Image (spheres, grey):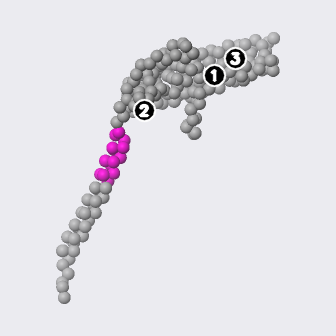
Amino acid sequence: MIAANPEKGMRIMKKSFHIVIALVLGIFIGSATNAFAAIGDVVEAEFAKFVFKVDGEEKTLDADPLVYQGMTYLPTRTIANLLGKDVVYKADTRTIEFNTPIETRIKEGAIIDQSTFNNQEYTKQQIEMIDYQIQTTKRMIEKEELSLSVPGLDDSSKEMFNRSIDQLNKQLSELESRKSELEAQLQSQQTQ
């Protein structure tokens, strides 16, 4: 009969335990290396200067286009503004809409036919639409300001966001001024 050696059994258990720990650490380190490699990919691209013309009129962009593998990438909001469009981003569906500004559609008669409204109703409708634009512009400013707080943002990106915020603040000021004019006009209409 062979006598069992408890000391030898403990050594085998310790070796097995060390092997399992080594395998787990190896798998963990290997996955971390793969994850880092996926995050650490480097893309080589360059900013470029171009001349942009819209309907024959030369326009200046507030951000330089990015050229990557022969393809030129332009900031959505910059292009929309260049074309005289409003931009709406719907996060729930990840949809970007380019819309003709409401004021332009009103001027072109696409939204409201003034002859179907009396002056007060028409002015109230304009105020409502401008108020909607004011709220939308404020939300856009908030999103741009939030983008500025992203850690590690480079100076070029910060400059682009700041220019966009400045442009949106200017647009907001113009909308609020137009709304005040319309409210004064409505008061005048109501006293007549």
- Residue 64: tell me if it is visible: yes
- Label whose residue precedes the other's in the sequence (2 or 1): 1
Q: Which residue is nearer to you in this view: 128 or 95?
A: 95
Q: Name the spot of residue 126 as percent of width and height, x first.
A: 71, 20
Give, as a single range, the part of the protein colored magenta: 28-41
- Label whose residue precedes the other's in the sequence (2 or 3): 3
Mark-to-mark CA distance, 3 and 1: 10 Å
Residue that carries the numbered disc 3 in the rendered image: 107
Residue 27 lies, with reference to residue 124, above or below; the image says below
Q: Main secondary structure of the magenta part?
A: helix
Residue that carries the numbered disc 1 in the rendered image: 101
Q: Residue at x 43, y 22 (%)?
A: 64
Name which residue type carries label 3.
Lys
Q: Quadrant of residue 151?
A: top left
Residue 72 lies, with reference to residue 91, above or below; the image says above
- Label whose residue precedes the other's in the sequence (3 or 1): 1
Mark-to-mark CA distance, 2 and 1: 30 Å
Q: Name the spot of residue 142 as percent of width and height, x first.
A: 52, 28
Residue that carries the numbered disc 2 in the rendered image: 150
Q: Is residue 47 left or right of residue 74?
A: left
Q: Is residue 191 left or right of residue 172?
A: right
Name which residue type carries label 2.
Val
Q: Quadrant of residue 118?
A: top right
Q: What SS does tag 2 mark?
A: loop
Mark-to-mark CA distance, 2 and 3: 40 Å
Q: Name the spot of residue 60 as percent of width and height, x first.
A: 48, 16
Residue at the far front in the pictured view: 70
Name which residue type carries label 1.
Pro
Q: Is residue 40 magenta?
A: yes
Task: Assess disc 3: are there few (<14), some (14-19) or many (≥20) residues with their C-alpha within 10 Å of its C-alpha.
Answer: few
